[in-house]
Image: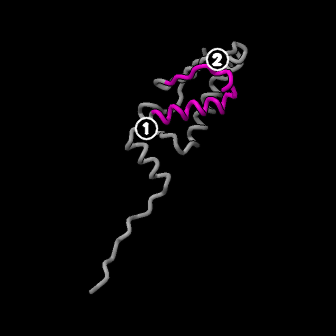
Amino acid sequence: MEPIRIHRKEAVSMEDVVKQYIKSMKLAAGLNTQRIFEAWDSCSGAGEFTLKRFFRDGKLYITLSSSVVRNQLHFQKEDLVEKINRYLSQDTLFTEDNSAVGYVRELILK
């Protein structure tokens, strides 16, 4: 009797497995939003002054507790959007091709 041969499937990296799981469970939009908020905190340095965060249709709405910080950041809005998107592009958990929640196109400070 000849031994039974089990054929191995191609190995899949954990990164690919996690991405497939996120996609199949439809978690990408919520996860992307959280990654955007984390990118804001990291890139702006204003996390401690941030009262509210909201993201919709490519617009990141930020409510700040300090008018001085808001004025300082107002003049850096375009640079901040670029920094945030660069941060997101390096984040392995950020799903770039998500139609619901993608990169930041505009920053609105309140």
Residue at 54%, 45% (x, y): give it. 92
The residue range painted magenta reads 30-55
Residue 104 image position (x, y, % from top left): 53, 29
Q: Residue furthest toward the left?
A: 1
Q: Amino acid at mark 2?
A: Leu
Instruction: Label 1, secondary structure: give it.
Output: loop
Residue 76 image position (x, y, % from top left): 67, 23
Instruction: Label 2, secondary structure: give it.
Output: strand
Mark 2 crowdedness (10 Å alpha carbons): few <14, some 14-19, many ≥20: some
Q: Quadrant of the N terminus?
A: bottom left
Q: Taken as a whole, is the magenta stretch helix, strand or loop? A: helix
Residue at 49%, 26% (x, y): give it. 58
Given residues 43 and 85, the one toward you in this image is 43
Figure quadrant of residue 82: top right
Q: Amino acid at mark 1?
A: Leu
Inter-mark Cα distance, 2 to 1: 28 Å
Residue 6 image position (x, y, % from top left): 34, 73
Q: Quadrant of the C terminus?
A: top right
Residue 96 image position (x, y, % from top left): 48, 39
Q: Look at mark 2 in the image and give the residue it sits on.
A: 64
Given residues 91 and 1, the one toward you in this image is 1
Residue at 58%, 34% (x, y): give it. 85
Q: Look at mark 1 in the image and give the residue it sits on.
A: 27
Q: How many marks?
A: 2
Given residues 81 and 23, the one toward you in this image is 23
Q: Is residue 14 left or right of residue 85?
A: left
In this rendering, the answer to whether 18 lies above or below 89 is: below
Q: Is residue 95 magenta?
A: no
